Image (cartoon, grey):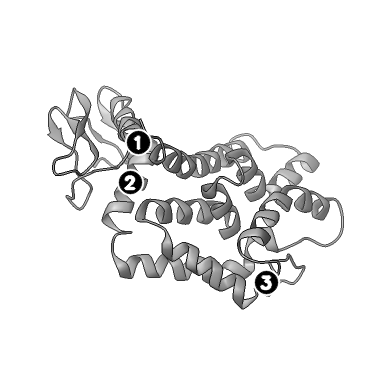
Amino acid sequence: MRGDGTAPRFYKKVEVVRVENGGGWGVALDGRALKTPKRAALAVPSKSLAMAIAAEWEWQSGRSIRPFTMPLMALVATSIDQMTQEEVRDFHVRKLLEFFPTDVVLIKHEPGKLADRQAEIHAPILKWARSELGPGVEPTESLYGAQIPEEAMAAAEKRLRAMDPFELTATFNAAASAKSLLTGMALIRGAIDVEQAEMSARVEEDFQIDEWGLVEGGHDIDKADIAVRLAAPRALMSLLRDTL
């Protein structure tokens, strides 16, 4: 790996291949099966997802591989290498639940224009949360966080622990990017789209931009970054569910 985070491109041909022994679909570089950083076989159950990963490798420049432009590859590798381990899964579930009370969707600003915008943008997420986790999931103005009913916490934990490695990886990454378990879960479950998730994650920043203006080279880069961070997990789940 070079100092700029890139590596030399060492292959010419990229193709989608069948993984032996019913392992689904994989990617081959010059005929050699692609592996994860831990040298496990990169195998996914959906040909559509394998094609998208292959496209990430194909679209690298003629001389360099830029891992930071391959979000699906990163998510799948994490799913296979990390989220298949019980202790790693448990750590990520506990972390998501630990920050549930201070979820961005649950912390309201004091009454005013910003609070009104929060209420509008977060409404569909809260509607989904109350339907899926229980009616007691309510926002608060307290800096110490919301009071999550035991039933809602238990429902969230049950859902997280029931996820397969791909879905848990997608949910964790979306939630971490949005600073919101509820936004991450609602996005991955298809209750909201990527644009809604981005608006939820950036409601305060976008409000300040509207008030004071956009700083080029700062706000615009942040906005593009979180768009990718939220779109990639959602794309992962959509491609996994594709029957192609």
**Residue at 28% over, 42% down:** 44
Residue found 58% across the figure and 67% down from its top: 100
Circle 1: element type: helix
Q: Specify the quadrant that holds the C terminus.
A: top left
Q: Residue 233: horizontal and vertical position, in percent? A: 46, 45
Q: How crowded is mark 3: few (under 14 residues within 10 Å), some or many (20 or more)?
A: some
Task: Identify which residue is drawn at 12% across, 29% down.
Answer: 31
Q: What's the CA distance linking mark 1 and mark 2? A: 9 Å
Residue 10 percent coordinates (x, y): 17, 30
Q: Is residue 221 left or right of residue 235?
A: right
Q: Crowding near pointer 1: few (<14 within 10 Å), some, many (20+)?
A: many
Q: Earlier in the sequence, mark 3 or mark 1?
A: 1
Given residues 219 and 82, the one toward you in this image is 82
Residue 17, image quadrant: top left
The kind of residue tagged 3 is Gly
- The residue that mark 1 highlights is 49
Which element is circle 2 on?
helix
Q: Residues within 10 Å of mark 2 (few under 14, many from 20)?
A: many
Between circles 3 and 1, the one closer to the viewer is 1
Quadrant of the frame with the N terminus? top left
Q: Name the residue under label 2.
A: 76
Residue under label 3: 145
